[in-house]
Image: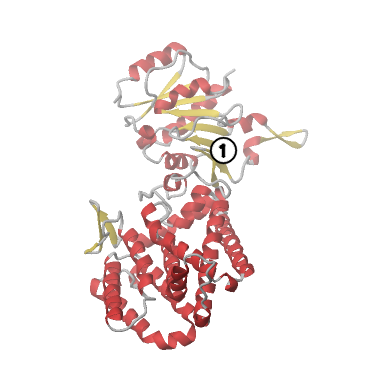
């Protein structure tokens, strides 16, 4: 087993070490929550018992953080420390560098003592499945953003869409999100929503930076005018809460790179407090806020981040022969990059190449899937099939959980493929459409069609083969069998479908 981190019966392990989740759904959630809290301990001032108590709290926090064995939260901790230290300036750092070195030694001791060092050893990172699978997932997420940059792939469907249309056909890893809040938001909601979020986060960080630096650079000019409410709270926030809030927000933003945190409402508590502190502090020190720079950096961050994701996704898509794109809720269109190959759709007419309209029509397919027939990820089976096709096609694949059929028609002569309990939709198809019923469920309809083939499983698990055979023979419908299969067709797929397509072509050639 090449993965260092595994999950077993709700428990998380790193090698032989149990990862602590601390009552959170996952250790990554626990680590993200802890790292946002720890930042507030860095700015507590005082000597004697207060300093000792604060360091004791930090030691406990570092130990619990490391026991989650989350590498992403360690990166977030480092980024937050850099931000907090940078707000102090060189003069303050010369006075506090010893305490920062002591904190570094504490974290290092916890990392070595708990065995987390194994997970961050460069010799193991390249072989760790938790990293390699995540990189593949992120690459697929970039392609998904490029495929639907404006509207996204529907909320809550990012992991399922990835497994169906972008994950390796033979891979079995399961995902519910992009394991990255920014990618997940861009995939689910589109780049405009992600851009607004990135702009807002950048604005908050710039405000935290400017107000923190102004308070440190001008400690004697902190005013508490009578016309400004909550004077005492704002006064204290300018002294130490602003750097802590900014560092906490940095930790939150970095943690979101490695885990999808935005979908857990409880994890918003500390970041929301940090945002409130930054808002209050920025209002009180608004004379030091350079709004032109604030909004310039915010807009630049939004444009650079969304533009970079889109360009990266397009670069990855260049090598793909088939381009998936969400058409509507539950409907994905697969389009061949090179459509209409000359040898397939061109004929000579007085020395000129003429496009055959009939060939265009026959190149379209509409597929209504059924998980009982294709398994949990029908998209993988569709991709496995199209790799065997001799010429490009446009394929509309419909997930009956979400799709309602609106806008799903293909061309006027598209071939409809209906699987399992979706066979009732044959009444909705155009009258002249070719039709394939794969392992149909339920009772047959009253009417039949001329260009129709029924594919039945060799092992009749539902006990309906006899009924469908009788219906097919009565209507003159051709019957085919998928060998060595029950309701699940995958063991005979895609060979049986290619045979059926050839039979459909033969039917069309008969006057």
Which residue is found at the position 36% from the left and 86% from the top?
Answer: 98
Please tell me whether residue 354 is drawn above or below residue 450 in the rendered image. Answer: below
Quarter of the image with the N terminus in it:
bottom left
Left or right placement of residue 107 versus residue 288 in this view: left
Q: Is residue 246 something that shows in the picture?
A: no
In the depicted view, which residue is nearer to us: 408 or 504? 408
Q: Position of residue 470 (x, y in %)?
A: 38, 13
Based on the displayed image, in which of its 4 quarters is residue 102 positioned?
bottom left
Q: Which residue is mark 1?
A: 393
Residue 149, image x, y percentages: 57, 50
Position of 108 with respect to 88 (left or right) is: left
Q: Residues within 10 Å of mark 1 (few under 14, many from 20)?
A: many
Q: Is residue 352 toward the left or the right of residue 64 in the image?
A: right
Rendering colour mode: secondary structure
Query: 315 or 270: nearer the eye?
Result: 270
Q: Position of residue 22 (x, y in %)?
A: 26, 60
């Amino acid at each position: 087993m090449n993965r260092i981190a595994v999950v077993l019966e709700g428990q998380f392990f790193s090698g032989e070490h149990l990862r602590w989740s601390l009552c959170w759904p996952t250790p990554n959630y626990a680590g993200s929550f802890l790292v946002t809290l720890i930042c507030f301990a860095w700015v507590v001032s005082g000597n004697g018992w207060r300093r000792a108590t604060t360091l004791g709290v930090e030691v406990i926090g570092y130990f619990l953080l490391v026991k989650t064995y989350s590498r992403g939260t360690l990166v977030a901790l480092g980024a937050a420390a850099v931000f907090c230290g940078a707000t102090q300036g060189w003069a303050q750092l010369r006075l506090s560098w010893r305490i920062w070195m002591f904190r570094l030694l504490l974290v290092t001791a916890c990392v070595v003592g708990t065995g987390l060092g194994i997970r961050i050893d460069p010799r193991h990172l390249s072989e760790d499945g938790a990293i390699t699978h995540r990189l593949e997932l992120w690459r697929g997420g970039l392609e998904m953003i490029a495929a639907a940059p404006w509207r996204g792939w529907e909320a809550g469907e990012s992991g399922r869409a990835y497994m169906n249309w972008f994950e390796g056909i033979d891979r079995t890893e399961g995902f519910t999100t992009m394991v990255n809040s920014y990618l997940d938001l861009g995939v689910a909601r589109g780049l405009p929503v992600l851009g607004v979020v990135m702009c807002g986060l950048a604005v908050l960080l710039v405000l935290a930076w400017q107000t923190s630096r102004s308070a440190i650079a001008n400690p004697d000019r902190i005013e508490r005018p009578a016309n400004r409410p909550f004077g005492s709270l704002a006064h204290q926030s300018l002294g130490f809460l602003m750097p802590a809030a900014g560092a906490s927000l940095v930790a939150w933003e970095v943690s979101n790179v490695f885990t999808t945190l935005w979908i857990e409402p409880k994890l918003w508590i500390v970041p929301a407090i940090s945002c409130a502190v930054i808002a209050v502090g920025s209002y009180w020190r608004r004379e030091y806020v350079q709004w032109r720079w604030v909004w310039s950096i915010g807009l630049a961050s939004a444009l650079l981040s969304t533009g970079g994701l889109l360009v990266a996704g397009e670069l990855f898509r260049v090598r793909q022969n088939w381009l998936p794109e969400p058409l509507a809720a539950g409907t994905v269109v697969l389009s061949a990059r090179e459509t209409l190959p000359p040898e397939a759709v061109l004929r000579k007419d007085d020395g000129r190449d003429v496009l055959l309209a009939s060939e265009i029509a026959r190149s379209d397919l509409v597929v209504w899937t059924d998980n009982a027939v294709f398994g949990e990820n029908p998209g993988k089976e569709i991709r496995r099939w199209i790799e065997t096709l001799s010429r490009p096609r446009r394929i509309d694949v419909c997930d009956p959980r979400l799709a309602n059929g609106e806008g799903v028609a293909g061309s006027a002569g598209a071939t409809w493929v209906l699987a399992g309990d979706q066979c009732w939709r044959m009444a909705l198809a155009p009258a002249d459409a070719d039709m394939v019923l794969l392992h149909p469920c339920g009772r047959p309809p009253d009417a039949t069609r001329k260009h129709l083939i029924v594919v039945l499983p060799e092992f009749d698990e539902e006990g309906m083969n006899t009924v469908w055979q009788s219906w097919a023979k009565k209507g003159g419908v051709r019957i085919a069998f998928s060998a060595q299969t029950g309701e699940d067709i995958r063991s005979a797929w895609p060979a049986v479908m290619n045979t059926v397509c050839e039979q459909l072509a033969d039917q069309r050639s008969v006057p």
